[in-house]
Amino acid sequence: SSSIAGMVLPSVLVPLCGKSLDMHFLAETANVVGLELSEAACEAFFAEANYTVMGEQANPKASHHLWQTPMLHPFGSQISIWQGDYFT
């Protein structure tokens, strides 16, 4: 979790996040962690918000990718989306 001046931001989990606009709202007060199966939904979320992908990392064993925004607000919130099939 991020912090500034001793304030620790909470984290919010958003399963099946898709390209939900709710994640932008939640990022105003917390770090947001989304879970998504569709790579297309992750690409669309970042493209529509004009966010740069900061940390697209792959875990070759599990075929998961991490999509992260840069820090979004002065207090340092961030949106991270873990993309992949978690049931295989």
Image: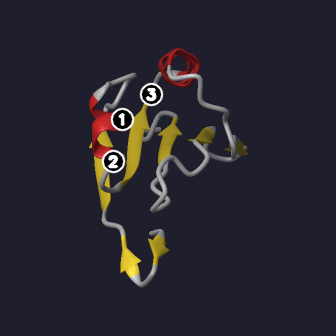
Q: Which residue is mark 1?
A: 24
Quarter where residue 24 is shown:
top left
- Residue at 40% over, 39% down: 35
Q: What is the CA distance from the residue labelled 1 to the residue labelled 3?
A: 19 Å
Q: Secondary structure at mark 2?
A: loop
In the image, taking residue 27 as reference, residue 64 lies left or right, namely right
Q: Nearer the viewer, mark 1 or mark 3?
A: 1
Quarter where residue 60 is shown:
top right
Given the image, on which type of amino acid does mark 2 rest? Glu
Q: Estimate how packed mark 3 is, as few (under 14), some (14 to 19) or many (20 or more) residues with alpha carbons within 10 Å.
A: some
- Residue at 39% over, 41% down: 34
Q: What is the CA distance from the residue labelled 2 to the residue labelled 1?
A: 7 Å
Q: What is the CA distance from the residue labelled 3 to the residue labelled 2?
A: 24 Å
From what the image shows, is residue 68 above or below residue 77? above
Of mark 3 and mark 2, the one earlier in the sequence is 2
Q: Which residue is mark 2?
A: 28
Total number of numbered discs in the rendering: 3
Q: Secondary structure at mark 3?
A: loop
In the image, taking residue 54 as reference, residue 39 lies left or right, namely left
Quadrant where the N terminus is found in the figure: bottom left
Q: Nearer the viewer, mark 3 or mark 2?
A: 2
Q: Nearer the viewer, residue 30 or 74?
A: 74
From what the image shows, is residue 61 above or below residue 85? below
In the image, taking residue 1 as reference, residue 11 lies left or right, namely left
CB under 8 Å between discs 2 and 1: yes
Q: Secondary structure at mark 1?
A: helix
Q: Which residue is mark 3?
A: 37
Given the image, on which type of amino acid does mark 1 rest? His
- Residue at 37% over, 24% down: 18
Q: Estimate how packed mark 1 is, as few (under 14), some (14 to 19) or many (20 or more) residues with alpha carbons within 10 Å.
A: some
Given the image, on which type of amino acid does mark 3 rest? Leu
